[in-house]
């Protein structure tokens, strides 16, 4: 019986016998095999080219704080901007946020999970995640092929070549606002209360990692630009005082606030602040015990890496994400232990600083 194709010739269907090729000369058979081989090569070449072009696009793509990255072995990362220390190239500073649940060491269980496609991820970042000691014991060693050997606190420098996908908070914003009922109206009112434009807001955090708009237990959002960040952070404080936002935060954090029955967690991103250490180096010079600092300049305290001016002359440089926006001018802060280090900037200028690269925590007193 023949295979009938929908090709019309003289108003009749053409039928090609199943053994048509077998009855052709040997040269015809070889020609058919060569054509199939060429087609396979073309398809493979196009696949390789598409992968190469995608990698090239990733290598050159701008990454802002709040972007979500997925690396080749399946880890989900939160980007801390687009900068690198001296001698480290083609990397993105970021913190590992979620790992495949199946990759966790035996006996290590975590409370919070998300599902992305067919994969289940365990949350290792934040209050319900892993300690810094556990990052150093379990997480970073397993990723030594894709991160630089230098880490700063929870911040690792992820090789751009290992990045499979980048999700930008600004690009996700419109999808989130359009697809989720009530989202645009809520964020429009939120932007008005913060005295910024809605186009200066990006949607980040776990909802960006999942890639599907939904009202989660809290919505992480990023404010873009130095002036917008300064205004929004000031209005965040004002709106807590006048009751527009909740006076209390979501324990144990200090930044999240409730607005119109939903919780929001703000982040502040300005590329000029995030790149202050680009091309520089950090040298840890020892540690101090029982230190009290009085904060005199909090103007860079909402960005990451985080700098606070102190009355003792040295600035406090901290790589703990939870220190962002925590201290205000006039606060007296007690550290049981505190590092001392030297920052050498790309210009060659050196600065001695108080340095937080471990689990040091400062209590306001």
Image: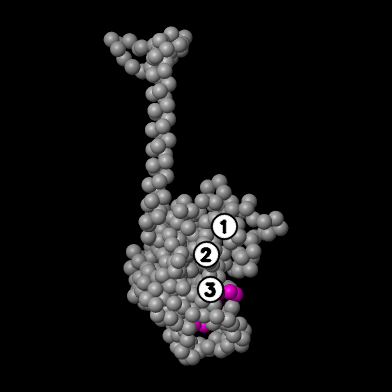
Tell me: 116 left or right of 46: right
Q: Residue at x 40, y 48 (%)?
A: 54
Closest to the observer, 261 or 272: 272
Segment tinted magenta in the rendering: 353-359
Please tell me whether mark 1 sits on a helix, a strand or a loop.
Answer: helix
The residue at the far left in this view is 10
**In the rendered image, which residue does mark 1 sit on?**
143
Please tell me whether mark 3 sits on a helix, a strand or a loop.
Answer: loop
**In the rendered image, which residue does mark 3 sit on?**
320
Colour approach in the figure: one colour
Evaluate if marks 2 and 1 touch, with contact meaning CB atoms under 8 Å apart.
yes
**In the rendered image, which residue does mark 2 sit on?**
156
Closest to the observer, 98 or 20: 20
Is residue 69 placed above or below 252 in the rendered structure?
above
Circle 1 residues within 10 Å: few <14, some 14–19, many ≥20:
some
Circle 2 residues within 10 Å: few <14, some 14–19, many ≥20:
many
Can residue 211 be seen by looking at this rendering?
Answer: no
Can residue 201 be seen by looking at this rendering?
Answer: yes
Please tell me whether mark 2 sits on a helix, a strand or a loop.
Answer: strand
Spatial CA span between label 3 and label 1: 21 Å
In the rendered structure, which disc, 2 or 3, sits on the residue that comes first in sequence? 2
């Amino acid at each position: 019986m023949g295979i009938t194709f929908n090709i019309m010739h003289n108003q009749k269907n053409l039928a090609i016998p199943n053994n048509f090729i077998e009855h052709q000369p040997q040269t015809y058979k070889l020609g058919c095999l060569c054509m199939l081989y060429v087609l396979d090569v073309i398809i493979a070449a196009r696949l390789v080219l598409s992968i190469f072009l995608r990698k090239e696009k990733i290598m050159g793509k701008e990454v802002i704080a709040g972007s979500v990255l997925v690396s080749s072995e399946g880890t989900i990362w939160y980007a801390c901007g687009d900068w690198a220390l001296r001698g480290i190239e083609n990397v993105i500073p970021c913190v590992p946020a979620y790992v495949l649940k199946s990759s966790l060491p035996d006996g290590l269980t975590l409370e919070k999970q998300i599902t992305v496609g067919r994969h289940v991820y365990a949350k290792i970042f934040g209050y319900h995640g892993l300690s810094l000691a556990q990052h150093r014991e379990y997480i970073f060693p397993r990723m030594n092929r894709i991160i630089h050997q230098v880490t700063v606190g929870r911040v690792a420098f992820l090789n751009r070549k290992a990045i499979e996908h980048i999700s930008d908070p600004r690009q996700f914003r419109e999808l989130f606002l359009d697809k989720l009922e009530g989202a645009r109206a809520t964020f429009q009112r939120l932007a008005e209360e913060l005295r910024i434009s809605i186009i200066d807001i990006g949607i980040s955090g776990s909802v960006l990692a999942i890639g599907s708009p939904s009202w989660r237990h809290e919505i992480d959002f990023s404010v873009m630009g130095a002036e917008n960040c300064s205004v929004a952070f000031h209005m965040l404080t004002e709106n807590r005082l006048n009751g527009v936002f909740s006076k209390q935060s979501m324990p144990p954090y200090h930044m999240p606030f409730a607005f119109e029955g939903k919780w929001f967690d703000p982040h502040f991103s300005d590329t000029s602040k995030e790149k202050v250490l680009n091309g520089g180096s950090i040298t840890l010079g020892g540690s101090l015990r029982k230190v009290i600092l009085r904060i005199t300049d909090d103007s860079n305290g909402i960005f990451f890496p985080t700098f606070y001016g102190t009355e003792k002359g040295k600035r406090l440089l901290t790589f703990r994400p939870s220190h962002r926006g925590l201290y205000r001018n006039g606060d007296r802060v007690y550290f049981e232990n505190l590092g001392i280090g030297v920052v050498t900037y790309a210009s060659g200028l050196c600065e001695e600083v108080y340095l937080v690269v471990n689990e040091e925590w400062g209590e306001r007193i």
